[in-house]
Image: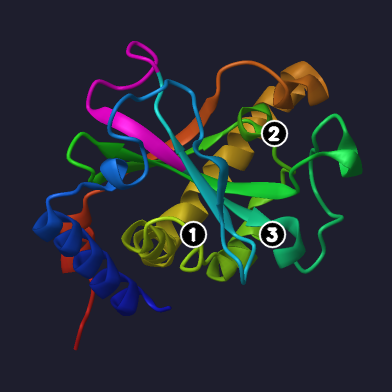
Amino acid sequence: MDQQQAALTVIETITAMARENVPMMARVVPSDKVLFWQHYPDDDARDTRTRSRWYYHVHAPGDRDPGEHGHFHLFLHRTQLDDPSRYSAAPPEGEEASAHVTHIAGLAIDHMGIPVNWFATRRWVTDEFLYPADTMIAHLDRYNVDNTKEDPLVNRLLTAMVALYRDELCCLLRERDAAIARLVQVQGPAAHESGEALLAKIPIDLDAKIESLDFG
C-alpha cells in the first residue's frame, strides 16, 4: 500500500466511524467498564494471513497524558522477518518465550478516537524480541492486520497508518535505537529489562500529513 492509498483508507475508516458515531476505542473496549492495563482483546488481535497483530490498552490516570484515552501496540511476528535469528535482545525465556513478536510502535489516540502520536518503548514493555531499526524498517510493509477477528474498520486503519507514516516510523525507530545505545553504554544489557518505558515519541497531525501528499 502506497502513501496515497493509505491516506484514502485512513480518511475512509475515520469517516465511517464518525458516521456510525462509534469511535475507535469503543470498537475495541467493552462499553460497561474499562480495566486499566488490560489487553483488548485479551489474547491480542492476530491476522490470520500475515500473523501481524495488535492490542489496545488504557493506562491509569496519572500514568498517561490527559489528552490520551489509550494506545495500540503494533507487532510483526518473527516469522515475517527474513532472518528472525538476528535480534538485539530477547525475552528471558529466549526461544521458549510465549510470544514471538517484535514491536513496531505504539499508537496513542485521544478521547475522540483520533491518533495523536507514535511512540517507541524499551524491550521489557511488550516483552518483544527486539530487532535493530534497519531490520524493522525493511519489513514495515509486511505489517497488515486487515484479517483479524476484531472490528474491520480498526484493522484497516491500523494497517493504513503504518503505511502512511512509514517515514516517521523510520525516524522513530532510529531514535529508539540511539536512546537504547546510550542506556546500554551506562547500564549494559540490563537497560532492556527495566527503567523508564518511553524512548522516543513523534506527534501526529493527520490533516497536515494528508495535505502534504501529492494525489496528482
User: Could you give the CA–CA distance between mark 2 and mark 1, rounded to whole angstroms?
Assistant: 23 Å
Residue 149 is marked as 1
Position of 44 compared to 202: left or right? right
Across and down, in percent, residue 141 comes to 54, 70
Say what amino acid the circle numbered 1 marks.
Lys
Label 1: how many Cα within 10 Å (few below 14, some 14–19, many 20+): some
What residue did someone put label 3 on?
135
The alpha-carbon separation of the residues under discs 1 and 3 comes to: 28 Å
| Residue placed under numbered mark 2 in the picture | 127
Amino acid beneath label 3: Thr
Instruction: Locate the C terminus and report the quarter of the image it occupies.
Output: bottom left
Give the structural element (helix, strand or loop) at label 1: loop
The answer to whether residue 73 shows anywhere in this view is yes
| Closer to the camera in the image, 54 or 32 | 32
Residue type (three-letter) at the residue carrying disc 2: Asp
Q: Nearer the viewer, mark 1 or mark 3?
A: 1
**Residue at 51%, 34% in the rendered image:** 39
Lower sequence index among marks 3 and 2 = 2
Q: How many marks?
A: 3
For the point 76% across and 17% down, the residue is 187
Magenta region: 60-72
Residue at image point 21% right, 47% down: 23
